[in-house]
Image: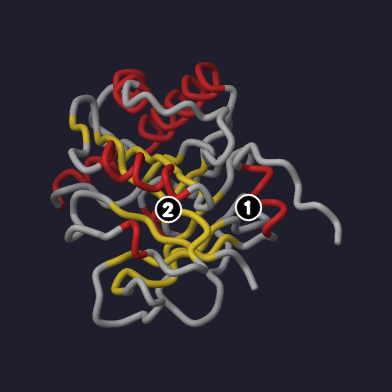
Amino acid sequence: MNPRGIDISDQNSTINISALPSDIAFVWMKTSEGETFQDPTFQNYYHEVKALGNVMRGAYHFFIFEDEPIAQAKNFLSRGVDFTLPGVLPPMLDLENQSTDAKDQWVKDNAAECVQKVTDWLNFVKQETGKDAIIYTYKNYLIEYLDSASWPNNGLWLAAYQTNPPGLPPGYTTVNWWQYSQFGQLDGTTTGGSIDLDWFMGTQEELNALANMQPLAEG
């Protein structure tokens, strides 16, 4: 079975990290948004996940397309995550609908500029951390808002609330992560809760490698 995990932010109700089910392999946490916003829940959650010892931890940034990309990258990196430590997953960039219909329309109208801004963010974070960031989005967002842009050197995480794995957007051959529910509960139930539930679409060994951990010993 693929490794399972959750992703959380200040939009969630308080989550008891110490009560995570034993099959949760990773927790992604929002660090920042735009040029200045910093998620107030991040530091506590990050240290609580780290204290568990056996759960990988990830940090992500919510991209504001009208903001300056390098300022956004610096906001993200200012949260103090060392992406070279064991148990720490690569950076992740969240590309999705903005806060208003007017802002979404601005992205559509300025797709080429927005694609360049994303590229600038990814390049700066790679320069500073040595890591290729993972891109979180949904298939139709890349198609409808970003003119079918792709960043094939970066891992792809798709949101698709369905039974079967999501289809690929143009320019990609693999989905690395799949957010399969936005109404999950910690026990893995996919309705009735408010937690995003996720699959890593590779093996445990591949997940370990992404998180700077030694491969599992062969039995």
The correct choice, above or below, for 161 with respect to 89 in the image is below
The residue sitting at 37% across, 56% down in the picture is 7
- Quadrant where the image shows the N terminus: bottom right
Is 8 left or right of 101, judged from the image as shown? right
Name the residue: 54% across, 17% down: 127
Mark 1 = which residue? 172
The answer to whether residue 24 is above or below residue 95 is below
Q: Position of residue 12 (x, y in %)?
A: 20, 58
Evaluate if marks 2 and 1 touch, with contact meaning CB atoms under 8 Å apart: no
Q: Looking at the image, tell me whether mark 2 or mark 1 is earlier in sequence order.
A: 2
Q: Is residue 172 left or right of residue 68?
A: right
Relative height, residue 204 to residue 133 (above, below): below
Q: Amino acid at mark 1?
A: Tyr
Per the image, the residue denoted by label 2 is: 27
The answer to whether one can see residue 108 in this image is no
Q: Count residues near mark 1 (Cα–Cα under 10 Å), then give few for <14, some for 14-19, many for 20+.
A: some
Classify 10 Å Cα crowding around label 2: few (below 14), some (14-19), many (20 and above): many
Q: Position of residue 197 (x, y in %)?
A: 40, 67
Quarter of the picture containing the C terminus is bottom right
| Identity, as a three-letter code, of the amino acid under mark 2 | Val
Is 27 displayed left or right of 212 in the figure?
Answer: left
